[in-house]
Amino acid sequence: MRLEEIGTRYLTAKPAPNHSGWKPFVRSIRAQFNAMRSHGITVYRVYEPEVYRDCDAMFRDIRDHQRLFVSSVESLVPGHPLVARVDRWSGYTLNTAYRAVHDFYGHYRQGLDMSYRGEIEAYYAHLRSFPEVAWDVLYSELVGQLGMHALTGSFLPVAGFPSLRLSNLRFGNPAAEETLTFH
C-alpha cells in the first residue's frame, strides 16, 4: 500500500480519542522516556521544524553530548491529547516525550535515517516496545502521519485532529501488513 493511500485514509477516518490503546501508549511513552533519561540523555524542546541538518548530526549529538533536541509543534496543533497539556510526571508534553523516544529508540538505537523507509523501519523496530493494545495508536501517530506527509507535504493537520483518527486506518496485525511502497 502506498503512503499516500494511508494518508488519505488517515485524513478521512473518524476521530477516536477514547480508543483503548491511548492509556497504554502513554504509559509506554513515560516508561521509555524515563529509561532514556536514566541513560543520561537530556531532552531539549525547540520550536524549529527541522532541528538537525541530518540524521548523522542527531546521532552525533546523542553519542557525543548525551542530548537530544526535539521539535515541539504544540502551539500548531492545539487540542491533541499528546500536546494539550504538559505532563506533570515528566515536565514535557507527551508529544515531546513521544518524539524523543521515537528518535532515540526508533532511529538512534537502530541506526535508521529519517527517510520514509527509515521511518517505517523505525516504526517496526519501536513497535516491539509497546503493548499490543497500543499498536493502533502508534500506527496512527507514526505511519498515519507519515502518510499524511506523503500526501500533503505537511505533518500539520489539514482539518480536525487527524492523529486521533484510528477508525478505518489499521490494516490488521503489523507483522502481516501489506508491503508499503515508496516513490
Image (cartoon, helix red, strand yellow):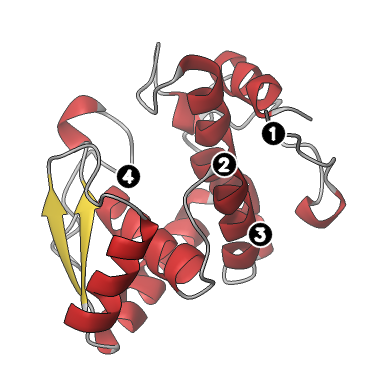
Q: Using the rendered view, name the quadrant where residue 49 is placed.
A: top left
* Disc 4 packing (10 Å; few <14; some 14–19; many ≥20): many
Task: Specify the quadrant that holds the C terminus.
Answer: top right
Would you name the residue on which mark 4 appears?
82
**Gap in Å between the C-alphas at discs 2 and 1?**
7 Å
Query: In front: 138, or 55?
Result: 55
Could you say which disc has been placed on residue 182 in the image? Answer: 1
Of all residues, the one furthest to the bottom in this rendering is 39
Would you name the residue on which mark 2 appears?
116
**Gap in Å between the C-alphas at discs 3 and 1?**
16 Å
**Gap in Å between the C-alphas at discs 2 and 3?**
13 Å
Would you name the residue on which mark 3 appears?
124
Circle 1 SS class: loop
Circle 3 SS class: helix
Q: Report the amino acid beneath label 3.
A: Tyr
Circle 4 SS class: loop
Of the numbered discs 2 and 3, the one sitting upstream in the chain is: 2
Residue 24 rendering spot, x and y as whole percentages: 51, 61
Q: Report the amino acid beneath label 1.
A: Phe
Q: Is residue 161 visible to us here?
A: yes
Q: Report the amino acid beneath label 4.
A: Leu
Of the numbered discs 2 and 4, the one sitting upstream in the chain is: 4
**Gap in Å between the C-alphas at discs 1 and 4?**
28 Å
> Mark 2 touching mark 1, by CB under 8 A?
yes
Of the numbered discs 3 and 1, the one sitting upstream in the chain is: 3
- Whether 166 is drawn above or below 24: the answer is above
- Whether 66 is drawn above or below 57: the answer is below
Could you say which disc has been placed on residue 88 in the image? Answer: none
Of the numbered discs 2 and 1, the one sitting upstream in the chain is: 2
Using residue 68 as the reference point, say whether residue 10 is left or right of it: right
Residue 50 rendering spot, x and y as whole percentages: 25, 41
Circle 2 SS class: helix
